[in-house]
Amino acid sequence: MLKFTRVFRRSYSIVHEGLLTQDVLSKYNLDPKKGFCQFELESKLNEAISSMGWRKPTEVQLNLIPSVLCNHNCIVSAAAGTGKTGAYLIPTIQKLVEAKQTLPELVTEEEISKEKLKIYNPDAILLVPTNDLCKQVHNEFQKLTVGNEWLRSIVLTKDSSMRTDLLNFAKFKDHRVVIGTPVKLYQHFLLTYQIMNSMEASKNIEDEIDIKFDIKRHAVLNSMNLRYFVVDECDRMLNLGFLPLVRNLTSLMNSIGKSKKDYVTVSVSATLVQSVHDFVINLSPSHVLLDLNAKMEIPKNIQQHFFSITEDNKFEALKFLFSLNEEEKFSLKVKNSLFDFENKKVVIFVRSSTKADYLASTLKKMKVKAASHHKNVPLKRRNYLVLIGTDLLSRGVDIPNLTHSVILDPHYLGEEYIHQVGRCGRLGKPGMSITFVNKEPIMEKIGFVKTKLVELRHLKNISDLLNREINLSQLPGFEPKKNELPAHIEQEANKILKLNNDEFKLSDKCQHSSAFLLQVVKKKSEKENKNFIPFDELPFYDEMKIKNNERKLKKKLPQLNLEASKKVILSSQSSLSNINSKITIENNKKVKEKSKENKNKSSPPFKESTVRKLHPSLKNVKTEQKKKYITVDNDYESIKLHQVESQALVWEQQMEQRTMSSKKPGQEYVKKEFEHKRKVIDRK
Ligand SMILES: Nc1ncnc2c1ncn2[C@@H]1O[C@H](COP(=O)(O)OP(=O)(O)OP(=O)(O)O)[C@@H](O)[C@H]1O
């Protein structure tokens, strides 16, 4: 059963609610004003700490260091950038230095040549969620072990192959610490398990495992000597779906090392959610809970700003922030220092790696030193001022003197915001977070799935987590325009604009774009999403199937009455005319010429079937109303509509004339014919 030990409140303010256990308090006379000497650390470790410029322990260090030194399992949460890495590294190093005498001898050549399974037994395993964070922790570890260089660490990430790792285990048997990602560590423990099992059962190792294992040169990872097991960013691990993996990893580790619960477990995160508690139960039954960020607050040194910006304007707004001239900056600075991005280190969070790359290249064109970081691009720490990344960048990444966190696409998880904002204003330095929120829902492809994203909901998650109301402000010059279409409609319409004319025939493009707009605006007027067909799903792409698709489209296309059609044209005029004028501007002349030719011909320009095919949405539109409908005539679509309409009118007039003059024999027949034709037109 999980047992949290809560002790009494400290007299000084920096230590939060009763956190430290009695034995810790009686052993150490803790004082936040005193330096690291209060922990009675080994002299070289003390020197290394002071050479890093760390004078006094931070709050989390003051709590965690003595607790680990007293061998307590700990769950710790503290705001981002408060020195958690040092807080778990310092006591681990101290304990390993103390135990130096008991270290195994270096492996000798003779030993290596024996046909015996070599085992690498580290004293500490630090589980870190991503490759870049592993490297960051490794760097900090190296700095803290200056003077104690014998205490090295091996990094296990996807950057090295399994065989290289196995070679390193044999070669660097004296390296006491392993820093690795869950996947790589799991792979190694599984391999050890398989090899040990096959050896026990006197089976051929090669038959049992996929890797070419060289028993003379390779060693396997074991946890027999394990004394410290640290899970950094543990809620991140859970969010990334590593929970089953980490569970399997620990159970493998325990069964191989036969060291169940012999080691001290430290679980660290900036945000402590219930799932972390549940997860920790599996690691160790009793824990000291050092919850220094229970309220999940953003440190006061970080200014937070939330702006309402439409999806299409987000990049523009960002570019605007970067490209303000001195005068503009000055005028805006009067109100807010927010706009001063010059020579500042900025981190920008976006939803996808494609967006990150696009934005980085756009900013580079503006001569801003920008770089992107996501799963395909490793973290570059030099020569840039602006780093653009996905949520991979939000955890643990420590960039000194970073002042601005810009969240272009707010994450659906509220706690992610805390981590993203935590990249700036670290350790009490001034920082500023800017979050852009698109009020309209948008459809976006995430991986292979098209998802409806409602950023207002994400904002609510943030406000629920921070337990405060969040008001959206307007960025000057980016206020919403009147009669603006909802962002998701604009977004879809813009996709149409980006298509090349070669992709399909102009007529099809116009027809479908207008059909699409008619459809989405119908949706808008009905204020429901059920019949909404995203652009990508409209049957445009395969020219060969266009006829079939048209039939499908007709079925899908909701029936429009005049009012709806008129609204389409009027309310979406900007988009429609945008689309039509932009798509057809070059082709307009040709089209007009064609239409003139058609008009000049005595025979009607379209056959009845063509009219029906051309504009299925004309169905149910009555003659008088049709005249009003033909209001916009400076683009191709309306010209076409005009032709269709005028043709329809011509027919009607013809029929009416025939009816008028048909008070002769055969009148009945003509009347019937007229009624029939009228029905046909009405159906059109
Ligand atoms: N006692 C200290 N005095 C001064 N600087 C410190 C101290 N402890 C840590 N730092 C520095 O503070 C910065 C943030 O530390 P660290 O990355 O460990 O924070 P963190 O709490 O792990 O952040 P995150 O939640 O983002 O992972 C680092 O640059 C580190 O070198």
Image: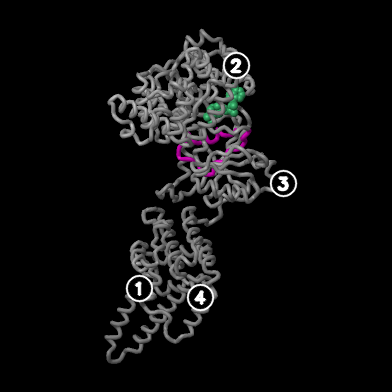
The disc, 3 or 1, on the residue closer to the chain's N-terminal end is 3
Q: In this view, does 302 lie to the left or right of 451?
A: right
The range drawn in magenta is 401-424
Tag 4 residue: 591
Return the residue nearer the eye: 458 or 21: 21
What amino acid type should be assigned to the residue bearing mark 4? Val
Do the residues under discs 4 and 1 have CB atoms within 8 angstroms? no
Q: Residue 44 carries which label?
A: 2
- Residue drawn at (36%, 83%), measured in percent from left and top? 655
Tag 3 residue: 326
What amino acid type should be assigned to the residue bearing mark 3? Glu
The disc, 4 or 1, on the residue closer to the chain's N-terminal end is 4
Q: Give the CA separation, mark 3 to mark 1.
A: 63 Å
Tag 1 residue: 682
Looking at the rendered structure, the secondary structure element under dot 4 is helix
Regarding residue 18, the answer to whether it shows in the image is no
Q: Give the CA separation, mark 3 to mark 4.
A: 48 Å
Closest to the camera, between mark 3 and mark 2, is 2
- Residue drawn at (35%, 29%), measured in percent from left and top? 248
Q: Residues within 10 Å of mark 1 (few under 14, many from 20)?
A: some
Quick check: which quadrant has ligand 1? top right
